[in-house]
Image (cartoon, grey):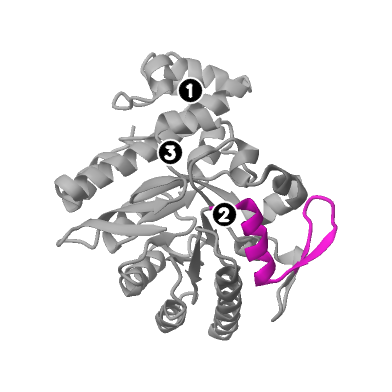
């Protein structure tokens, strides 16, 4: 993998770049639609390509459970199994340690999981996670990490950080044993503590990963905590490597993080909110189930060029949603993913050819007016 920074703004730390992988080139800043189990919910790979998605995300833990490693191994790669020939990033399962706390046990050697599907038990070491992602042949592979629940006392964040670093070193050594042409990213942790975050950057930086992610955020912390830690951590990451903010995805969060120098984002919000009738527009969020849209002949967003907005009214989409039609999830998710991908395209244009700072201010002023 090769990463090239094309343009850096002077007023902010916003930057554009190109991430080159074996399966395609990715323009940054980029939003990666989330396909946890090998599918972006309610959308096909054809839909995603038509909307301009250059990379999607899958989850190592969930795919390990279903369909299972032997199935993907039979196909030769996760790409062939799901019919996607562009880059894939696979998360490691570290977030599942956090989200499934009652069903896992963490130790120095690795983590014991109890399947949330059938209750079966299995044990994963950081080396195992590397090997599993090797079978997937994912273009960008995240190391197994660990972070304490929010909020956590400093001693818990300290222990979690030490374990994350120990696992990262083992994962890096395993990854380098089998050259594949793919890339491995480390995950910076440290809870709410700036000195722990700085220590994490320094230790992981010495291991020379292909990229660096900021983890342990968007788990319930206050907005000022989120902004403080992103603003503190990102400028300390290796400048020549891609920077990835994991799991954060409101338009406001993306704009703030881009201004600090983040290059990559993922979030389930576009599809999850779409399935629940909430849509992102240039003037804020719209709840399609509201009575006010019963007779509304307008599209979701008059400034949007997505398939849904070009063909369907708010009234019809409300009808589909309220009657439980599967088309509602498809059309609403399609709009939201298009909104996010188009949003990132506009961000890249502003950084490269205009002023990101002005774009950020103008977008937020309009977005916060409301529909």
Quadrant including the C terminus:
top left
Q: Residue 356's x, y, as percent? A: 20, 51
Residue matched to label 3 = 53
Dividing the picture into quadrants, the one containing residue 242 is: bottom left
Residue matched to label 1 = 291
In the rendered structure, does residue 127 fall within the stretch colored magenta? yes
Residue 349 appears in view: yes
Q: Residue 30's x, y, as percent? A: 37, 48
Left or right of 363, for residue 189: right
Q: Nearer the viewer, residue 8 or 297?
A: 8
Q: CA distance from mark 1 to mark 3?
A: 33 Å
Left or right of 253, for residue 176: right
Residue depicted at 38% across the width and 39% down the height: 341
Helix, strand or loop for disc 2: strand
Q: Magenta segment range?
A: 112-138
Disc number lying in front (2 or 1) = 2
Residue depicted at 48% across the width and 33% down the height: 48
């Amino acid at each position: 993998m090769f990463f090239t920074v094309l343009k850096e703004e002077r007023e902010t730390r916003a930057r554009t770049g190109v991430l080159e992988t074996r399966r395609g080139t990715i323009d940054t800043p980029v939003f990666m639609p989330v396909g946890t189990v090998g599918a972006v919910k309610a959308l096909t790979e054809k839909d995603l390509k038509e909307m301009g998605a250059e990379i999607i995300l899958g989850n190592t833990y969930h795919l390990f459970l279903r369909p299972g490693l032997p199935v993907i191994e039979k196909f030769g790669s996760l790409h062939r199994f799901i019919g996607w020939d562009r880059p894939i990033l696979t998360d490691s399962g570290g977030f599942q340690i956090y989200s499934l706390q009652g069903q896992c046990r963490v130790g120095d050697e690795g983590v014991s999981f109890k399947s949330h599907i059938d209750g079966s038990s299995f044990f994963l070491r950081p080396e195992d996670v590397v090997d599993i992602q090797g079978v997937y042949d994912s273009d960008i592979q995240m190391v197994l990490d660990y972070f304490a629940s929010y909020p956590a006392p400093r001693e818990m964040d300290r222990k979690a950080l030490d374990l994350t670093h120990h696992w990262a070193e083992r994962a890096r050594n395993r990854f380098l044993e089998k050259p594949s042409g793919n890339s491995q990213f480390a995950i910076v942790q440290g809870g709410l503590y700036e000195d722990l975050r700085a220590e994490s950057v320094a230790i992981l930086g010495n291991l020379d990963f292909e990229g660096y992610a900021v983890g342990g955020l968007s788990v319930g912390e206050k907005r000022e905590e989120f902004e403080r830690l992103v603003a503190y951590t990102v400028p300390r990451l290796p400048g020549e490597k891609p920077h990835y903010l994991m799991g954060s995805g409101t338009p406001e969060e993306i704009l703030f993080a881009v201004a600090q120098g983040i290059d990559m984002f993922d979030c389930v919000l576009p599809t999850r909110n779409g399935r629940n009738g909430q849509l992102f527009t240039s003037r804020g969020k719209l709840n399609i189930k509201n009575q006010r849209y019963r007779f509304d002949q307008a599209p979701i967003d008059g400034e949007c060029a997505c398939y849904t907005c070009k063909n369907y009214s708010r009234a019809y989409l409300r009808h589909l949603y309220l009657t439980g039609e599967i088309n509602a999830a498809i059309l609403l998710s399609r709009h939201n993913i298009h909104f996010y991908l188009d949003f990132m395209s506009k961000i890249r244009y502003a950084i490269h050819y205009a002023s990101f700072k002005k774009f950020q201010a103008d977008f937020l002023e309009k977005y916060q007016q409301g529909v």
